[in-house]
Image: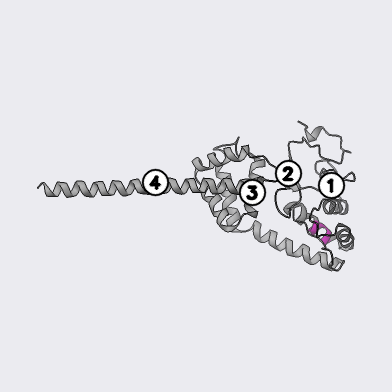
Amino acid sequence: MINPKDLPLEQTNCPLDCPFLSGRHFLPDILPYFCDCFDVFLGVDAGERTARCFLCRLQPENIVEEGLSLISAYTLTHLSISDTKEAFLQLSPFFQRMFVEVVKKTGRQVAIAYGEQVSADTLMAETLKEYKQAKDWLGSPELKEFKGILTGLGDFSPQLLTRQTKSLLENLFQVLDKSERAMLKNLMSSKGNAQALLEQFKAIPKDMSLLKNFRHMLYEHDDREKLRRLEQERRRQMERLNRVKQNTVGRGGR
């Protein structure tokens, strides 16, 4: 497996076997590749290969080059890559930097859609909207609670809950609906359930079907936990009934 520190600094692409290169193509509307070393989504280089970030190449950040690289990696068919690049180049340096930070940290494809006005104002409005949504989400009590749950499990199972797995679970958590997020938090709050879920999650192929398979696994574990609780409650009820019968028999014998 390639160690990115051993790569020549002039190499602009990530090797496919880099241990820090993680696919995110199974998440809707998100850029397809993520770097687990520097916690950023990645663009593409001039050869249309997944681009190494400037930190990996030990080079000063070039915001314009990085922005164009990220836009080139967009996959949504209703977005115009050429129009988005044109509008990006019209942005002020401040908003170019904000655009790059939003896209590489969230993976969201902030862009000019076909038919929209090609202007810096249009792209700036989209950037500000995504920036606010990302800020609200990152500061939300729900996400903070989930991150706290994952942190609490770190010492318990470091092989199952690696840094890469934490990052992927946080990305998946973001695209689940409210009830599914509640399921996941509940399951991960119990060490026994968390270990069973993480062991199964580790074996799931990280391909285009990951989100679908993850949801299926989540409901499967949630159903199993509900059955366990029902059985536990049934046993408690039986124990209470038995105690009542014993007390009744005891009083009748006096």
Q: Quadrant of residue 112?
A: bottom right
To which residue does mark 4 refer?
Answer: 231
Mark 3–mark 4 Cα distance, whole angstroms, equals 29 Å
Tell me where the magenta segment starts and ends, as one range: 94-99
Pick whichever of labels 2 and 4 is earlier in the sequence: 2
Foreground of the two, 208 or 182: 208
Q: Quadrant of residue 127?
A: bottom right
Does the magenta-highlighted stretch encompass residue 96?
yes
Foreground of the two, 194 or 142: 194
Label disc, if present, on residue 23 of the rendered structure:
2
Question: Alpha-carbon neighbours of circle 1 within 10 Å: few (<14), some, or many (≥20)?
Answer: many
Quarter of the image for the N terminus: give it.
top right
Instruction: Give the residue at x 38% y 46%.
Output: 232
To which residue does mark 1 refer?
Answer: 44
Left or right? Give the position of 199 relative to 105.
left
Q: Nearer the viewer, mark 4 or mark 1?
A: 4
Question: Could you tell me residue 132's position as x and y percent?
Answer: 71, 63
Amino acid beneath label 2: Gly
Left or right? Give the position of 198 relative to 47.
left
Pick whichever of labels 1 and 3 is earlier in the sequence: 1
To which residue does mark 3 refer?
Answer: 212
Instruction: Give the residue at x 84% y 47%.
Output: 44
Q: Secondary structure at mark 1?
A: loop
